[in-house]
Structure formats: structure tokens, C-alpha cells
Image (tube, grey):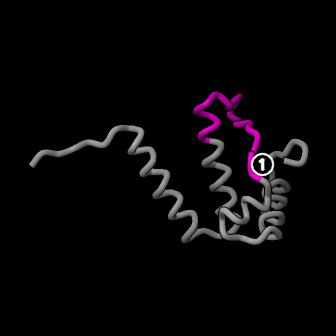
């Protein structure tokens, strides 16, 4: 039998899909939101968005879009984003 190795891009996509299934299935609302932001931050860091241990990016999703995407209510997303902010996990500039 011949062993076939997937190209790096395909492996990355499979890892992302696995992470996404875990995110939707077994995490709390706060963990889902933090995980989504971490996924976006990793991609932004790859594109040069990281500075001094921080990743700065424009979150192109509204809270309503995040709620729809994660299967949460808008109120839950708003509460959890506010909690992440007050705990110092994230910093927000402006309304986004």
C-alpha cells in the first residue's frame, strides 16, 4: 500500500474544520466567541497583523453575524464580548 500525504493547505483546512466542529459542539458561549476571535487572530497574524505579542485586526463580523454563525443569541454575544473585554482578554477600539 502506498501512503498519500495531504498537501499543507489541505491539512490546514482539515485542522480548521476539526477545530470548528469542536467549537460548535462542546464549548460554552464564552469559549465559542473567544475561539472564533482566536481563529481570526491567527489568520491575521499570518497576514502580518501581529505586533509585540498582540494581534490587531478589524473584526469584519457584527455581533449579530457572530450570533448567527455560532448559533447564539445577539444578547449572549454582546454579554460575552463585554465580559471578555472587562476581563482584559480582548481590547476593542471603536464600536467593533
The image quarter containing residue 6 is top left
**What residue did someone put label 1 on?**
90
Foreground residue among 80 and 87: 80
Question: Is 18 displayed left or right of 79 in the figure?
Answer: left
Foreground residue among 67 and 22: 67
Question: Is 43 displayed left or right of 14 in the figure?
Answer: right
Percent x, y for residue 69?
66, 62
Write the residue at 21% across / 44% down: 4
Magenta-highlighted residues = 42-61
Say whether residue 57 is magenta. yes
Question: Is 34 displayed left or right of 62 in the figure?
Answer: left
The image quarter containing residue 75 is bottom right
Percent x, y for residue 12?
44, 44
Q: Secondary structure at mark 1?
A: loop
Write the residue at 64% across / 37% down: 44
Write the residue at 82% across / 45% down: 91
Relative to 14, residue 27 above or below: below
Relative to 50, residue 70 above or below: below
Say whether residue 15 is magenta. no
Q: Please identify the residue farthest to the left as the structure is shown.
A: 1
Category of crowding for the residue at label 1, using alpha-carbon neighbours closer than 10 angstroms: few (below 14), some (14–19), many (at least 20): few
Write the residue at 70% across / 65% down: 68
Question: Is 74 displayed left or right of 9 in the figure?
Answer: right
Percent x, y for residue 52?
71, 29
Relative to 96, residue 8 above or below: above
- How many numbered marks, from 0 up? 1
Q: Please identify the residue farthest to the right as the structure is shown.
A: 94
Amino acid at each position: 500500500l502506498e501512503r498519500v500525504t495531504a498537501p499543507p493547505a489541505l491539512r490546514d483546512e482539515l485542522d480548521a474544520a476539526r477545530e470548528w466542529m469542536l467549537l460548535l459542539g462542546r464549548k460554552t458561549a464564552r469559549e465559542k466567541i473567544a475561539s472564533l476571535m482566536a481563529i481570526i487572530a491567527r489568520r491575521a497574524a499570518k497576514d502580518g497583523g501581529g505586533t509585540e505579542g498582540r494581534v490587531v485586526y478589524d473584526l469584519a463580523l457584527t455581533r449579530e453575524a457572530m450570533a448567527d454563525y455560532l448559533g447564539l443569541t445577539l444578547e449572549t454575544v454582546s454579554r460575552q464580548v463585554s465580559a471578555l473585554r472587562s476581563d482584559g482578554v480582548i481590547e476593542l477600539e471603536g464600536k467593533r
